[in-house]
């Protein structure tokens, strides 16, 4: 039933997209971003293009390898199994392309653009960017349910791998276990490469796991997520291995309070940069303003990083129905880092965290 609900929702989305195309003055639109294609159709293959044609029809193109998969994963949308290249198929006269075709400027290669120009030279091509963001920011209840399931699965894995941290265990050991256990419990894959960073390594917000073994008296940052039924999760916890210093403990407390402040302060209708500023000012008042250098958060959906962006340069408004992360951090170069992250769903009464995993300091 849930798949039927999502198929109906996607049909409604496609209607809204046609309306936006009309308002933008374009006759057709070629979608080349695989994540957007999956969001709009449910198709998860690695070769796909989606055409919004001038007669208000949408057509999904893929190849022979996926002819059975596309039947299983999609509903209510025409599909074409390509026997030749896409430009040749589009030039066949079978589709109403009109005079002006929009292309995703941030998701098309120069080579593909050249091929399209060669076969469809009579068309005017119009670049569009972030065309789907306003639709992807507002989450359907079924999308939220899938992300909640991804969160729950990943939290089960997090609890297991934290229990594996011991002398002689390395960052790579834990990262590999995260990936294995995500798949073992039913996730499609990690939503991004896990970050496992101990000690001074934790001062790098996007550190890559190394063969370094964990040392007592350090903080360990674990940032992880998975994909369940096409939707992502993202969470970060920082744990202590052995006895840590008063300074480390104090920084952890500041980040924990800042993260809770970000959740409590979030309201529909507020500017994203204002939420970032509220948390950033709190950390600065505690004396660590220069140590928090990244944005407060980002949207999550079929991709782990989506709109809205919540940072100093953000220009958008946080709307009811959006889902985004709240993830402040403090990073002391050469020494340690702390980050705590939840995904929150923004409702009429504020932000609800999807994660349930404790944010009190775990000391191993």
Image (spheres, grey):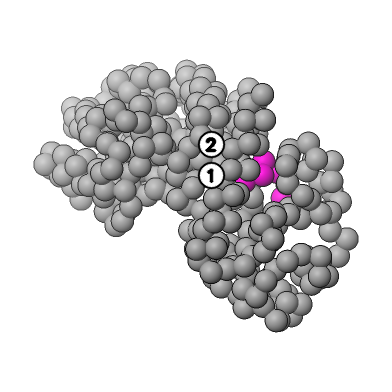
Front residue of 200 and 77: 77
Q: Is residue 198 visible?
A: no
Front residue of 199 and 78: 78
Residue 203 pos. (x, y %): 33, 44
Residue 164 pos. (x, y %): 50, 20
Residue at label 2? 232
Is the residue 186 above or below the residue 293 in the image?
A: above
Q: Quadrant of residue 249?
A: top left
Q: Quadrant of the C terminus?
A: top left
Residue at label 1? 303
Q: Is residue 352 visible?
A: yes
Q: Residues within 10 Å of mark 2 (few under 14, many from 20)?
A: many
**Over which residues does the magenta segment extend?**
40-46
Task: State the separation of the CA atoms marked 1 and 2.
Answer: 6 Å
Mark sitting earlier along the chain (1/2) = 2
Residue 59 pos. (x, y %): 73, 54
Q: Residue at x 55, y 61 (%)?
A: 21
Q: Main secondary structure of the magenta part?
A: loop
Residue 243 pos. (x, y %): 28, 22
């Amino acid at each position: 039933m849930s798949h039927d609900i999502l198929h109906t929702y996607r049909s409604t989305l496609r209607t809204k997209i046609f309306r936006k195309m009309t308002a933008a003055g374009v006759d057709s639109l070629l979608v080349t971003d695989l994540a957007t294609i999956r969001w709009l159709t449910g198709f998860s293959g690695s070769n796909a293009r989606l055409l919004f044609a001038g007669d208000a029809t949408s057509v999904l193109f893929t190849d022979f390898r996926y002819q059975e998969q596309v039947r299983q994963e999609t509903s209510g949308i025409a599909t074409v199994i390509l026997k030749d290249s896409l430009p040749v198929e589009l030039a066949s006269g079978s589709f109403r392309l009109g005079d002006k075709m929009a292309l995703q400027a941030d998701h098309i290669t120069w080579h593909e653009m050249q091929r399209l120009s060669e076969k469809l030279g009579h068309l005017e091509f119009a670049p569009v960017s972030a065309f789907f963001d306003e639709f992807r920011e507002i989450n359907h209840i079924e999308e939220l349910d899938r992300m909640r399931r991804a969160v729950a699965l990943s939290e089960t894995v997090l609890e297991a791998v934290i229990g594996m941290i011991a002398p002689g265990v390395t960052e790579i050991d834990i990262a590999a276990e995260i990936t294995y256990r995500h798949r073992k419990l039913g996730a499609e894959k990690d939503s991004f490469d896990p970050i496992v960073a101990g000690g001074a390594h934790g001062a790098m917000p996007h550190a890559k796991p190394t063969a370094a073994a964990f040392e007592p008296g350090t903080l360990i940052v674990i940032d992880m997520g998975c994909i369940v039924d096409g939707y992502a999760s993202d969470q970060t916890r920082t744990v202590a291995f052995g006895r840590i210093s008063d300074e480390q403990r104090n920084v952890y407390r500041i980040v924990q309070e800042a993260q809770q402040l970000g959740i409590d302060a979030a309201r529909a209708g507020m500017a994203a940069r204002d939420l970032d500023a509220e948390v950033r000012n709190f950390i600065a008042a505690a004396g660590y303003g220069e140590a928090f250098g990244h944005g407060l958060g980002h949207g999550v959906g079929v991709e782990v990083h989506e709109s809205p962006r919540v940072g100093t340069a953000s220009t958008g408004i946080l709307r009811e129905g959006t889902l985004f992360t709240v993830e402040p951090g403090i990073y002391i170069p050469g020494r340690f880092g702390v980050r705590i992250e939840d995904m929150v769903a923004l409702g009429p009464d504020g932000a609800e965290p999807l994660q349930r995993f404790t944010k009190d300091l775990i000391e191993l």
